[in-house]
Image (spheres, rainbow, N blue to C red):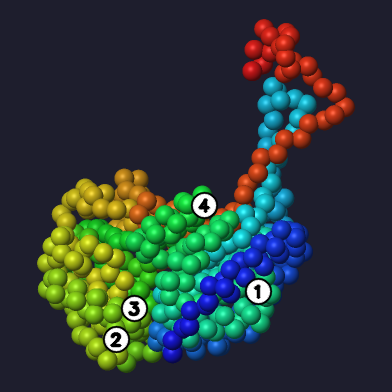
Amino acid sequence: MSITNTENRIIERTIKAQREYFASGATLEYRFRKEQLKKLQKALATWEKDLCEALWEDLHKSEQEAAMTETSIVKSEIKHHLSHLRCWMKGNRATTPLKMMPSCSRTMYGPLGNALIISPWNYPVQLLLNPLVGAISAGCTAILKPSPQVPNVSLTIEKMIKATFEERYIAVVQGNREVNKALLQEKFDIIFFTGSPALGRIVMQEAAKTLTPTILELGGKSPCIVDKKADISIAARRIAWGKTLNAGQTCIAPDYLLIHSSQKQAFIKAFAKEIKKLHGEKTEKSPHYVRMVSDKAFERVSGYLRDGDIAFGGKCIAGERYIEPTLLDNVAPSSPVMQEEIFGPVLPMIEFTHLDAAINFINRREKPLALYYFGKSDDGKEVLRRTSSGGACINDTIMHIANENLPFGGVGNSGMGNYHGKRSFEAFSHLRAVVTTTTLFDLPFRYMPYRMWSLVKKIL
C-alpha cells in the first residue's frame, strides 16, 4: 500500500477554509471545545480496533503494545483535558503593584489559531493525536500530516478524522516530503513537529520566514548509565524493556549504555536472561516484537553491528526486517553507531570506572531527549544536576512520558517546547496579560507635566 500526495489546490483550499472558520469565533467557547474532545474520545473507542490492526500491518505492533503505547496515552490525555479545561481557560489573577493603582491584573489564554501538526511513523497514533488534543483544548483548528511510511495507519486516521470532524475545523493531509514542503510554504499560527533533528531544522527555517511559533519534538542519543551500585537484575529488565519497546524505534529509547566496568559482564548475562523472559527463546517468534519500519531502516540499523563486538544477539532476517536485540561491546566513541540516533534494537556499551567520566562523556555531546541512570538515587540526582536532557528517569526507562502531569519535550538539539496535560493546552495558546482600570476616578500623577514628582519617584 502507498500514500497518494494530497494536491496543492486541496491543501490551499483547506487552509483557507480553516482560517475563515477560526475567524468566525466558532472554536472559542468552552462548550464547543468540550464537545470536540468528547467526539475525539468517542472516535478513538470506535476506531481502536481498526487502528490496532493497521499498526500490526505497518509495524508488526501487537494489540497490547498498541494499546499501551498509543491509544491509551491519547485516551488519558483527553480525559485529563476534559477534567481541567474549564479551569485552564479561566486564566489567573496577578498581583498589581501600588504604582498601578487603581487597576487590577490577570492573565488569560487565547488560541493561537490555525495549527499544523506533523507526526512521525514510530508512534503514528499517539504522536499525531496527542498534540491534537492540545489544539482542540486551546480552541485552534488543525491540519494533521501523518507519515507516509505507515500507510495503513495514516489512511485509517484520515477516515476516522473525516468521520468525526468537519474539514474546515480538523483535516488530514497525506503525502511525502514534497507535501511537507508545500505545507511549510503556507502561513500557520503554530507548527507542532515531531521527527528528527535534521528535519526539525528545516521546519524551523521555513517557520522563521513567517515568524511562526514552532514546537519541535526531536530525538537524539539518549544515554543510559549503569553505575557500580546498580541493581543489575532490575536495570537489565527495565533497559531490555525500554530498548525493545517498538524494537527500539522510540525517540526516548536508551540509545547507548555507559556501564561501570565492574558491572559489564553481569549486565550482559542479565540482559540476555531478561530478553528471553520478555520475548521467549526466539525473539523473531514473539508476537510482541516489532519490525523495522522499512528496508532502508533495516539496512541502516543492521549495518551498526559492524561497529563493535557482538556480546549478545546479532541475528538479522532481511526479508522480515527483523533485527534481534543486540549488545555491542568494544565500541569506539567515533564509530557510526555512536554518531546518529540508532532508532533500533542495537545497544552499544561503553565502559567507565569513575562517574565523572560518564558525565563528561554525556556533556561533550548534544543534549539528549532523555537520560537514564541506574544506581543510588542520590548519585542519580547528582548526575541530573550536572547534565542536561529533555526528561530523565532514575532506576527506570521510558516511564516519564506516561505521566500527563509531567512536561514532555526536548532541549537544545533534542527539541524546544513541551506538551502533555496542561502544557499541551498552553502549547497551542497565547498567554495574554490584561490590565483593567476603573473609570470612577483617575489619579493624575502619571500624566504630564508630572506633578508631585518627588512623591511619585518614591512609589516607582
Secondary structure of residue under mark 1: loop
**Residue identified by numbered label 1:** 167
Reading the image, the residue beneath label 3 is 247
Which secondary structure lies at badge 2? loop
Image location of residue 256, percent across then percent down? 25, 64
Kindly indicate the quadrant of the structure image that contains residue 392: bottom left
| Quadrant showing the N terminus | bottom left
Report, in whole angstroms, how far the alpha carbon at label 3 lies from the one at label 4: 38 Å
Is 106 placed left or right of 193 in the picture?
A: right
Q: Do the residues labelled 3 and 4 touch (CB within 8 Å)?
A: no
Q: Residues within 10 Å of mark 4 (few under 14, many from 20)?
A: some
Looking at marks 1 and 2 on the same chain, the residue that comes earlier in the sequence is marked by 1
- In percent of width and height, residue 388 lies at 35, 49
* Residue 30 shows up from this direction: no
Camera-nearest label, 1 or 4: 4
Give the mark toward the camera: 2 or 3.
Answer: 2
Q: Earlier in the sequence, mark 2 or mark 3?
A: 3
For disc 2, the marked residue is: 321
Mark 2 touches mark 3? (CB < 8 Å): no
Q: What element carries label 3?
A: helix
Mark 3: give few (<14), some (14-19) or many (20+) Cα within 10 Å: many
